[in-house]
Amino acid sequence: MKLKFSLAFIGILAVLNVFAWQEIFILSSHNYVRVAVLDIGQGDSIFIETPSMRHILIDGGPDSKVLEKLQKFIPFWHRSLDVVVLTHPDADHVTGLLYALQKYRVGYIVWTGIVREGGNYQKWTELLSASEKKGTKVIKAQLNQKIVNGDVAIDILHPFEDLTGRIFGKQGNDTGIVSRLLFGKNSFLFTADISSNVEEQMIDKKIDMASDVLKIGHHGSKYSTSEAFLKAVNPKIAVISVGKKNPYGHPTSEVLQKLQNFGIKIFRTDQNGTIEMLSDGENIKIE
Ligand SMILES: [Zn+2]
């Protein structure tokens, strides 16, 4: 690939925040959005590349494997991520981000600001402060915020309000950031580990969740992905991020059966490896 440098000014807008990007050098652009659900074992890590080569990482999986998986998409000399989203600070989502924050300069970190015990929470907050000192902007996610880059928009659909400082002990799943990426006619819904409890609240609030691709909630746990939720999202493709022979029995036969009943195509990281999807705004190609 011929590397062509160009100076670009790109904006990320939020309803409450207008961010000013600094001028930076980027690679030449393309006309598709790449969404890769990384094969990082039991956990979640989703890499997004916009047409203007902006890099977004949603969660980091359970260990340092994310760094190796990212190498396929980010050239070794490119040491920055534009946006990092932590859906909730559980070990299988946050741990890989600890490594990512040490390797990459990060433009924006989007998370909920909740307080929890144990896991890698302490380390996360330490790295957050260190990143802020180096210029990273930290945004607390809530409904109606939007991350925009050119024709790509990522809408925050949950949590419904600012959760900063709220203590959740070890029950953080239902605080998770749910977001929907829109590009042309294509859409992707990322549901973190939310349970059907939150799914129901989102339906009650009449939040538009219709999406071509659904990242199945909580690795296919039977406490997520209700029938009502599947009806509201109406996806053609389901992606399950799950580790081989994990001790939780994920994905559960209950969820797999529901997806089959709805005629939804299933892709799993434990069987298919990293699931790479390319959207040109009309069609989604799966690699
Ligand atoms: Zn999880």
Image: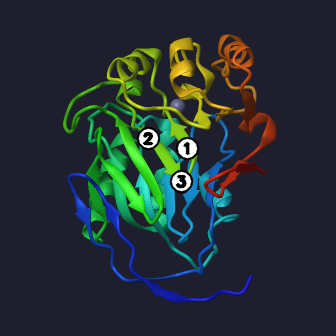
Query: 192 and 70: which one is in front?
Result: 192
Q: Are marks 3 and 1 in contact (CB under 8 Å)?
A: yes
Q: Residue 183 carries which label?
A: 3
Mark 3 or mark 2, whichever is nearer to me: 3
In the rendered structure, which amino acid carries the disc numbered 1?
A: Ser
Q: What element carries label 3?
A: strand
Q: Residue 187 carries which label?
A: 1
In the rendered structure, which amino acid carries the disc numbered 3?
A: Phe
**Residue 282 relative to residue 218: left or right:** right
Query: What residue do we see at 57% from left, 13% from top?
Result: 227
Measure the C-alpha gap from mark 3 to mark 1.
6 Å
Answer few, some or many: residues within 10 Å of disc 2's Cα (few below 14, many 20 plus, some between 14 and 19). Answer: many
Query: 129 and 280: which one is in front?
Result: 280
Per the image, the residue denoted by label 2 is 179
**Residue 161 relative to residue 110: left or right:** left
Query: What residue do we see at 42% from left, 40% from top?
Result: 87
Query: What residue do we see at 27% from left, 72% from top?
Result: 20
Residue 90 falls in image quadrant = top left
Q: Which colour scheme is used?
A: rainbow
Residue 152, position as x, y percentages in the image = 48, 58
Measure the C-alpha gap from mark 3 to mark 2.
13 Å
In the rendered structure, which amino acid carries the disc numbered 2?
A: Ser
Q: In this view, does 126 lie above or below 113?
A: below
Residue 22, position as x, y percentages in the image = 33, 79
Residue 5, position as x, y percentages in the image = 56, 89
Q: Is mark 1 within 8 Å of ligand 1?
A: no
